[in-house]
Image: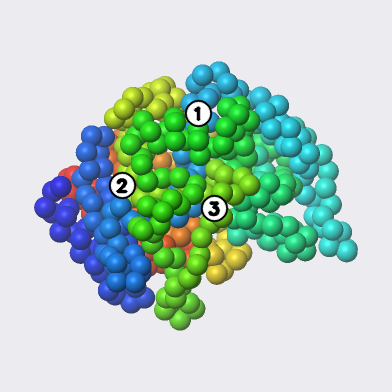
Amino acid sequence: MGEDLKAAADAILRRGVAQAPGLPGIVAMATDRERTLYAGAAGQRSGDAPMTTDTVLAIFSTTKAVTATAALQLAEEGLIDLDAPAASYVPALAEIQVLEGFAEDGSPRLRPPARPVTTRMLLLHTAGFGYDIFNESYARLLRESRRPGVTSGTRASLMTPLLFDPGESWEYGSNIDWAGQVVEAVTGRRLGTVMRERIFGPLGMESTGFSLTPALRTRLARMHQRNEDGTLKVLDGFELPQEPEVEMGGHGLYSTAEDYLRFVRMWLDDGAGPHGPVLRPETVAMAATNGLGPSLRIRALPGVKRHLSHDAEFFPGMPKSWGLSFMINDEDAPTGRSAGSLAWAGLANLYFWIDRTRGVGGFWGTQLFPFADPASMENFLEFETALYRSLG
């Protein structure tokens, strides 16, 4: 760990906790292809217990890249055809229709899709599924139908209509939850079991899973909510469903910064892991490429449910595309992040990036709603900038 990076990053974390509006607890780590470059934490995990690099976090949508990795492994083995109808693996997908609006009585107007959803579309978020957090039509649909949201971990929560014909646009949503169902259908196993055998074991990710064991609970960070006046309150008892009906591949994992850094390092190192390869180099290269084509780009996420998310966009004004399954910045970022880097985030203000050009990546974790909290994003980007400055 370079002393310049350590001093700069430590100061950013301390400032993030101490300065108003303040963050409850932060963990940040950075790596190259071989070793950890920085590991630090500040603030509290729970009560008087300090945040540490092995603190257990609900990682929300940073789960998505892990689920995509499992699907890509099966595609390598010829068990999944990314371009075949995903309903050939999960027949329930054939029941999904396209939402064309609402009738006067508030009921949804639906029609059959023009083409089937494929697993590639699911990984690219071009299948048509959305989230009620970021889409008003979905928010209305769930509100008026009293349908459960995806955080319920139920199969019924996945049976939402498409917002457009598959392949015709990009919409961030429950697509990767369905990709997880494809993985389960092909393997005949629960998603968490597949991940343990194929990803967590080879990478040494011993503190990651869909359920909290007693040992993990002893290191669990408390969730917080930012009030309108900027103050923080603890969300006592917050917990994703344990032993859910569906292990949600889009958001359901618990993990630690140390574990997630092992996952980041694998993607930096062409799929290699300390206990054997996880992906082939050619698969990594394919997945790390813009899969949307020349005409589609991702867009900002509107915060429809303001207690859960602000309006959110990384590097506003910069063109961004999507791979399998990461955001890709199409130009060099002001932090130093190279064009073509992979990244995404989790709802409780967790962020990661994978810069395969410079051979570095990092993870930033808090447990705080709403998403895109200005203080958390500002400090995360300062941390990323400090890493690149240390590289020269």
Going from N to C along the chain, the mark reached first, 2 or 1, is: 1
Q: Which residue is mark 1?
A: 72
Going from N to C along the chain, the mark reached first, 1 or 3, is: 1
Q: CA distance from mark 2 to mark 1?
A: 23 Å
Secondary element at image label 1? helix
Q: Quadrant of the C terminus?
A: top left
Amino acid of disc 1:
Leu
Residue shown at 50%/67% (left/top)? 237
Q: Which residue is mark 2?
A: 258
Q: Is residue 157 above or below residue 370?
A: above
Residue shown at 24%/56% (left/top)? 40
Camera-near label (1 vs 3) is: 3
Q: Give the camera-side residue of 235 and 17.
A: 235
Q: Which residue is mark 3?
A: 242
Residue 160 lies, in percent from the top left, at 72, 49
Q: Quadrant of residue 140?
A: bottom right
Amino acid of disc 2:
Glu
Amino acid of disc 3:
Gln
User: Taking 99 as reference, is 181 left or right?
Assistant: left
Secondary element at image label 3? loop
Going from N to C along the chain, the mark reached first, 3 or 2, is: 3
Q: Is residue 100 above or below residue 24?
A: above
Secondary element at image label 2? helix
Please say whether residue 154 is visible from this viewpoint: yes
Q: CA distance from mark 3 to mark 2?
A: 23 Å
Residue 164 lies, in percent from the top left, at 72, 44
Q: Give the camera-side residue of 43 and 22.
A: 43
Please say whether residue 317 is visible from this viewpoint: no
Q: Give the camera-side residue of 113 and 290.
A: 113
Residue 50 lies, in percent from the top left, at 28, 65
